[in-house]
Image (cartoon, rainbow, N blue to C red):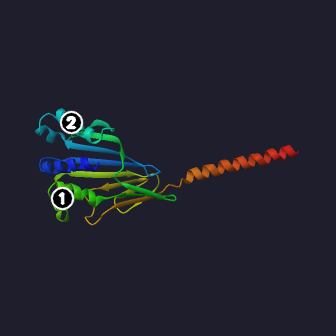
Amino acid sequence: MKKLLKKVFLASIAMALTGCMKINITLDVASDGTMTEAVTMLYQEKMLETAGDVDTALEEMQKSFKESYPDAKIETVRLEGEDPYAGVKASGIKNTEYYSHKEGNKLTVEIPVNELQADMSQDAGYDQSDFDMSALKEYGFEAVLVVNMPGKPETNAGVVEGKTVTIDLTSIPKDLDTIVITCSTFNVALWIGLSVAACGIIAGLILFFKKKKK
């Protein structure tokens, strides 16, 4: 994902003054710590029209996504409305860039924000110490990271709703090095179900042997 986001970041710098851009990154985390990712990048259609034909622009975006994610499912996306957006989505990406580990029933996911922003800002010719990604927000740039955890999460960034953490990447504090998200993978419902089933089996065996004694 890092290489593609560098391209996205550079594109946003170049076109920020001419239109809006939306990026959505969805990270699905399994109970064993493996992660699957989907990336959606959208531009205002009127911005794409300034570069020529919208469909041609989308074809070029698809090619770029395919180069970055050869094994992913690539599809075009359109958001209708008064100010329509169009872009490309890549899904089914196996994420190996973020760190996850388990200790007992506790699962921890770590996302190195500063490292990613440093790579992007250096490629754009910015000094990371003076760079603030939130400055792009006033030009309509949106970047959201959605992390779906296998259990109720706790995090040092973003908003938690159910098992989902939603993070506005343009509003992350500059001094935050790593987003840390934790949750328990202990399935209470499954444990109760197994306990009930075990009790039922034991009760059945007791009745069976009682009848046999008679």
For mark 2, give the secondary structure: helix
For mark 1, give the secondary structure: helix
Cβ atoms under marks 2 and 1 closer than 8 Å: no
Q: Position of residue 153 (x, y in %)?
A: 43, 57
User: Residue 19 vs residue 30: left or right?
Assistant: left
Residue visible at 18% across and 59% down in the picture:
135
Looking at the image, is 63 positioned above or below residue 19? above
* Displayed quadrant of residue 87: top left
Residue 87 visible somewhere in the drawing: yes
Looking at the image, is 56 positioned above or below residue 179? above
Residue 78 visible somewhere in the drawing: no
Task: Inspect the image, locate mark 2, and give the three-letter code of the amino acid beneath it.
Answer: Leu
| Viewer-nearest residue: 140 or 73 | 73
**In the picture, which quadrant includes the C terminus?**
top right
Q: Name the front one of labels 2 and 1.
A: 2
* Number of the label disc, if any, that sits on residue 115: none
| Viewer-nearest residue: 159 or 112 | 112
Q: Position of residue 205 (x, y in %)?
A: 76, 46
**Mark 1, other Cα within 10 Å: few <14 / some 14–19 / many ≥20:** few
Task: Inspect the image, locate mark 1, and give the three-letter code of the amino acid beneath it.
Answer: Ala
Q: Position of residue 122 (x, y in %)?
A: 18, 57
| Mark 2–mark 1 distance (CA, rounded to whole Å) | 27 Å
* Displayed quadrant of residue 83: top left
> How many marks are shown on the rendered structure?
2
From this viewpoint, which residue is outermost toward the right?
214
Q: Position of residue 173 (x, y in %)?
A: 27, 64
Residue visible at 15% across and 59% down in the picture:
126
Sequence-wise first label, 2 or 1? 2
* Number of the label disc, if any, that sits on residue 135: 1
**Mark 2, other Cα within 10 Å: few <14 / some 14–19 / many ≥20:** many
Q: Which residue is mark 2?
A: 58
